[in-house]
Amino acid sequence: MSAPSDLQSKLDEASAAYEEFASRGLALDITRGKPAPEQLDLAADLLTAVSDDDCFSPGGVDTRNYGGLDGLIELREIFAPLLKVPAEQLLAGGNASLTFMAQALTFALMHGTAIDDRPWGQGPHKLLCPVPGYDRHFTLAESLGFELLTIPMDDEGPIISEAQRLAEDPAVKGMWLVPMYSNPTGITITEARARELAAMPTAAPDFTLLWDNAYGVHHLRENHPDNLDILSLCAEAGHPERAWIFASTSKITHAGAGVSFFAGGPATVDWMRANLGNVAIGPDKINQLRHVRFFSDSAGVEAHMRKHAEIIAPKFEAVLTALEDGLGADELAQWTSPDGGYFITLTTMEGIADRVVKLAGEAGVKLTPAGATHPYGLDPHNNVIRIAPTMPTLNEVELAAKGLVACVRLASYEKLLAG
């Protein structure tokens, strides 16, 4: 450990650097994983893909009318191979996969599931939450009355021994999971770990993997992992209905006007369809037709995503460069270097994440609140910060990253000097 005089000198330097940055009067925001306007512009042709005299799908469906609860088959055929699911087991809905998640969980709470008709809501109900994780998963589940239990992760995915220990409780009904480029760490679950989850013994007969494939095609590099066929892995393990798969085009086309997807085992899809039929007549098929015409096929989606990568990959590199240049030599923090997705996770010294976020806010850099990556907003180590570099311009990202480094250095040396 450095001598107190050395630490004081470094603290003085960090404080001066912070004050210089704060004096610029900037207003930068790297809180949420929103697409940049340039990314949204890539899908501008969606807005003219359907005209008032050309509203029929290739199969002859009049998309202006009621019906078609499953969604357009042509759209499902485009995304089925990308998501590694059969098209007949894929439902296409409205603009938000979060809505499909809320509907599926609500149906289970009220009516039970495809393989156990005992409503989850009739007794205690809990969900496993790998951390760091996605705050909206936690907020949704908490709003529906689930107790949230945290599961640590390593570079291969959730720690199975801990998940299995907790799943010995029959009240544990499932687990959240972002399998590809997890929010916010960027971890992609390995096939070996996914097989373990598919086969894992559980007390609840209808234990469910809430498989949110939000970033399944959001690659930053040419060499990237492929999506896993989790339905086949579950079927091979004797649990064909274990996985509920969610996805959307929210960060592919227009974030507020995309399409969402739900998939599962054959019985689960029948169960979801039957329950949806009680609350809906059909999705927005005009918007689905727009997407069919815009993409044409699965290759069209992949080509489109390469354009996204060209826009956002430099922003990720800017953050990683700033972190390495500003923090690497002194080993004041660790961070992830994801191959895709929308986030970088910064892990500081214990006990200072909230201080870093406060300093950044006062200096004009808005960060996601410390603790947002954990259930109930409580990070027990107070050391995880989620960075979302996609929305601002590259210049803004570079400035924000340098400001973040200044905040981490100041908070770190404050802690070190305090002992």
Image (cartoon, rainbow, N blue to C red):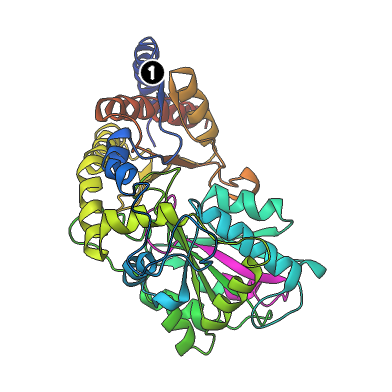
The image shows residue 163 at horizontal and vertical percentages of: 58, 71
Which residue is found at the position 23% from the left and 40% from the top? Answer: 311
Is residue 3 inside the magenta stretch?
no
Q: How many marks?
A: 1
Front-lying residue, 41 or 247? 41
Q: Secondary structure at mark 1?
A: helix
- Mark 1 Cα within 10 Å, few/some/many (few <14, many 20+)? many
Is 284 situated above or below 81? above
Residue 28, position as x, y percentages in the image:
39, 23
Residue 123 appears in view: no
Residue type, numbered disc 1: Tyr
Q: Is residue 177 magenta?
A: yes
Q: Which residue is mark 1?
A: 18
79 or 229, nearer to the observer: 79
Is 86 situated left or right of 91 in this image? left
Residue 249 spot, x, y in % from top left: 39, 53
Q: Which residues are magenta?
A: 162-186
**Vertical comparison of 365 with 183: above or below:** above
Task: Name the residue rendered at 33%, 40% in the picture.
Answer: 331
